Image (cartoon, grey):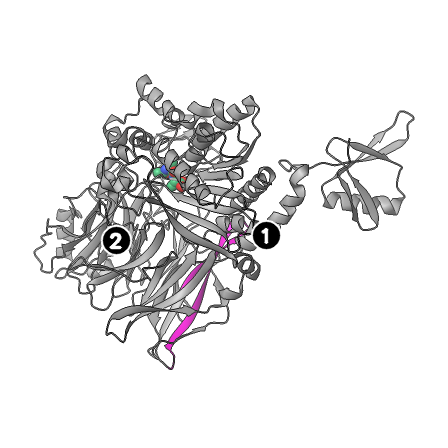
Amino acid sequence: MALAGTYSIGRINFLRLPLFVTAVTAPAPHSQSSQFLRATCLFSRKLSTALAMDGSKISAVVEEFPSGIDPATEEEYVEQSKLLEEFTKIPNFDKAWTFKSDSGDSVVTFSISQANLLANKKRKYTLSAHISNGNDDSEVNFKWTPFPVEMIGVSTIVPSPAGSKFLAVRNPENDSPVQLEIWSAGQLEKEFHIPQSVHGSIYTDGWFEGISWNSNETYIAYIAEEPSPSKPTFTLSGYQKGCSTDKDSTNWKGQGDFKEEWGEAYAGKRQPALFVINIDSGEVKHVKIIEHSLSLGQVVWAPSIGEHQYLVFVGWSPEPRKLGMIYCYNRPCALYAVKAPEFGSEVNEHKLKDEAKEDFPIYNLTQNISSAFSPRFSPDGKSLVFLSAHSSVNTGAHCATNSLHRIDWPRDEKLSFSENIVDVVPVVHWAEDDLFPGLYSHGLLANPWFSDGHTIIITTIWRSRSAIVSIDILSGEVSCVSPDHTDYSWNVLALDGDNVIAVRSGPVTIPGLKYGFLIETETKDVVWNWVDVLNPMFNCSTKARTLLSHILFSILKIPVKDVSNCVTKGASEPFEAIFVSPFSKGNELKPLIVNLHGGPHSTSTSSFSKSLAFLAAVGFNLLIVNYRGSLGFGEDALQSLPGKIGSQDVNDVLAALDHIIDQGLANPAKVAVLGGSHGGFLTTHLIGQAPDRFVAAAARNPVCNLALMVGTSDIPDWCYVECYGREGKNYFTEAPSAEHLIHLYNMSPIRHVSNVKTPTIFLLGAKDLRVPFSNGLQFARALKEKGVDTKVIMFPDDKHPIDRPQSDFESFLNICVWFKKYLK
Ligand SMILES: CC(=O)N[C@@H](C)C(=O)N[C@@H](C)C(=O)O
């Protein structure tokens, strides 16, 4: 057997042997052997001692590789893991808030996150800057505070409206109380510990989440988990009648009834409910509503009506049952108003009587539309604007083109809510070439208002990029704020008066801060002018920056292959793909990775992606395909996919691949494919339907067998809609018939598994409720059974996205090494 090579540690030379080979050596002198032992421990090679036939001791170096490490690619593993660490370190700007300082200048505070690999958590910190104008109009200076401040154990921070205070939320990891802290410029002002008997963790998930200060900065409304229901108690004398909360060594708690939850990402989370805290007294009130079964979220304080204060929030009904919520905008929801609770001294006898009579009724403000979320009041308090995903609810597609609406807010004592919902930005079905393709935004900024009081700013998906637009809520006019002739992606973080603080990035361009303001040109046009904001983080990740500096990207238009199959104009228009490759092509084409997003109604925008940038830096070209069905291209193109998954989307990907091969941009013999979830569905379909086209594949929590998924996923309705089209919404049942299961099987990658010969790596999250790991594992086992080169990594604590820092790291390191192995 050939030796794999030699290497040395300290003064001792080791023979590097393949696994299972035992080298017999003479007993080493004591000092040498202890050094030997230390070194072997360090490198996880085992020193075995055994007795030979003649009774002498035999020491052996057994070359033992950790599980999953292939001796043939170990060096590659070492090298690429170092590079990936550089990319993992790159921080991300998550949010920003602006305030006015005493001097009248603006101050901006950024919330930044960065993966902490050792702790396997995201490290969160804040960094602030004073913004001042430079000498001429086109200059702006950011004077940064010297150091960031780490937010240890803090789930979120929310500044007060005037910016003089902020709330820090500390959610416990066990049954301890939730901690709320009120900070002012110089100190911690107040600290409240809310026991679990009042409520559980505060929602900071970006979906149900809503934390809102009232304008006087005296109360904070928020969404938190209802207290735990009491469970049956048993002792050695049997069942104890009644609700005892105490648990001790003489009793134990039973389970009680199974309670439905909102699926993926919400396992173990209790019903989201509405609470208000008085930050003077620390008193907390649960705003119990009559229709108790609603899950509440996104609460905001409404402008007062007469002397009454109202809270407006989103309510989701659990009927017919709670189905998976995250990424699913097709769950019906409405805006509701409820009178805010009153505290202590404010309550007089008369009011107490009134409240008892009224019993906190809630008003549905958006009865005439099937979806309403992200409520925001205009600064004058006259209008309430909100987003709607009614197209998604009505068609059953989990995400679709959104719309923006307005309703009038009553100003007088006589509370009558208007039923009139004004369409500000309606659903766009199809748009000429590069015109506004419709609104694809999932939320509004906490303060999205320009100073005119009727224009908002919002980030949306515009074909293959994210873009910033302004919307006049009175006229409905949509204007570009970020540059319109660019392939880069832009994302608004905050307004500074009428100026904009944004982030610009590209797939291989590390996010950079930008400051935008309106200027008048020589021709008297008013246009947005953008300047770079140098920030302390600019110096980070120099290595990654250098590696990426010679890589470019462009957005390609891909003509639809079979236009005769298209029922709408929108569906027959070209879709797009993002192509990433180095400047100088040289003679040899780099191996290509085709990358496919999930959903399927989602988009790979041209925003920075650490994992894809890493793969590009390693030396792969990328083709990132936004097949028809992706968000950002109008509703007709999107709705062309449901009912045709596994064929239309598969053919679009092959068309995009053919397109770049025809242009001489890819070597057809060196192509790999990578995707997660629905992107994993496409990956496993492609290697089955086009087995000669891909030399390696990587699938992250892939959908491989819809007939299995329909009975195990939190979104069985998704399987119906995507397999039958919008009719699937009506066919959906919890008891699929044999005919349904056959149809679902026929639409699945597993149907083509016998054709597959592509070596495939599977990355699976054992806690995924969306696409349970059984889908990927069944497919992987079927490949192994056929003798196809297959590798599976199971992450025991990961959910659908496999995004915990260590899991994300190990996933992309292995994907990279797997692709390098087969795409030499
Ligand atoms: C709606 C949904 O979650 N669909 C999954 C099959 C999927 O593809 N998920 C997306 C969001 C993903 O990228 O994981």
Q: Give coordinates of residue 483: x percent, y percent.
A: 33, 62
Which quadrant would residue 241 be assigned to in this image?
Answer: top left
Amino acid carrying mark 2 in the image: Phe
The magenta region covers 110-135
Q: Nearer the viewer, residue 649 or 443?
A: 649
The circle on residue 823 is none
| Front-lying residue, 453 or 761 | 761
**Which amino acid is tagged 1?**
Leu
Q: Is mark 2 within 8 Å of ligand 1?
A: no
Badge 2 marks a residue whose secondary structure is loop
| Residue wearing tag 2 | 436
Say few, some or many: other residues with alpha carbon within 10 Å of mark 2 (under 14 / 14 to 19 / 20 or more): many
Q: Residue furthest left?
A: 414
* Residue 754 rendering spot, x and y as whole percentages: 48, 22
Q: Label 1: which residue?
A: 83
Residue 89 left/right relative to 579 = right
* Residue 739 seen in the figure: yes
